[in-house]
Amino acid sequence: MSENIHPTVFKITKETRSKALGQQPALIWFTGLSGSGKSTLANGTEQALNKLGFHTYLLDGDNVRTGLCKDLTFTKNDRVENIRRIAEVGSLMVDAGLIVLSAFISPYLSDREMIRNLVGEDSFLEIFVDCPLEVCEKRDVKGLYQKARKGLIKDFTGIDSPYEPPKQPFLTIKSAEMPLNEAIENIVDALLPKLKH
């Protein structure tokens, strides 16, 4: 950080905003392979939380790539920068008192640890959407695995780029083994004690 930058200390704090909204802010981070069901689960979880009166916001990989991170490629360095930017935005939203749901492959343990350190241990809830690669490939609605197998997409997670599963996630959802509604119900049940003020 430049020696000429001096962050302002604001009078209204995260705790003040949290109390006003009647909830504990958090960054709920869905991680897993492409096609594992992260976005579908994050969407369903946000809808369920919204019905319960929580103030939420959803950050999704494809949406962020069309705006905030549209200048980035899929090299390892750019993937790290992509996650860093999302973490910074998520951290600001948590500071605003919101419950933020994020659905990103985020394949590297070090990146997810960086997010945990940025947001804070109590505010970072990592959900591992655990799904076998062969199931993800069968789902492949975007045709990305097929392109990666043909060499048309380089550095594709699970094919020619690694995915490092979480060691101690807040919750693991085996998305190939349970119906969507049941998975969302399990997620919400696990989250509620953490999100109630």
Image (cartoon, grey):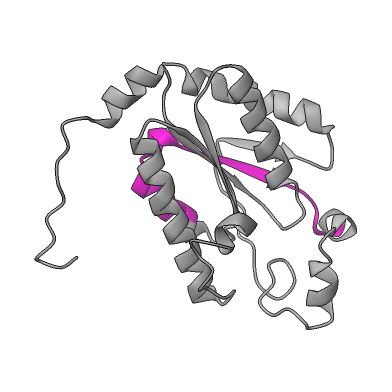
Q: Residue at x 71, y 23 (%)?
A: 185
* Camera sees residue 105: no
In the picture, measured across the screen, residue 78 lies left or right of residue 114, that is: right
In the rendered image, which quarter contains the C terminus?
A: top left
Q: Nearer the viewer, residue 109 or 75?
A: 75
Vertical side of 144 occupied by 36: above or below: above
Q: Nearer the viewer, residue 115 or 95?
A: 95
x, y percent for residue 107:
59, 60
Q: Quadrant of residue 23?
A: top left
x, y percent for residue 186:
69, 25
In the picture, measured across the screen, residue 183 lies left or right of residue 26, that is: right
Q: Residue at x 81, y 62 (%)?
A: 142
71 in magenta: no
Q: Residue at x 78, y 83 (%)?
A: 151
Which stretch did the figure color magenta? 112-134
Vertical side of 155 occupied by 58: above or below: above
x, y percent for residue 94:
39, 37
Q: Residue furthest right?
A: 138
Q: Nearer the viewer, residue 110 or 183?
A: 183
In the rendered image, which quarter contains the N terminus?
A: bottom left
Q: Residue furthest bottom?
A: 151
Q: Quadrant of residue 91?
A: top left
In the picture, measured across the screen, residue 83 lies left or right of residue 42, that is: left
Q: Residue furthest front?
A: 67
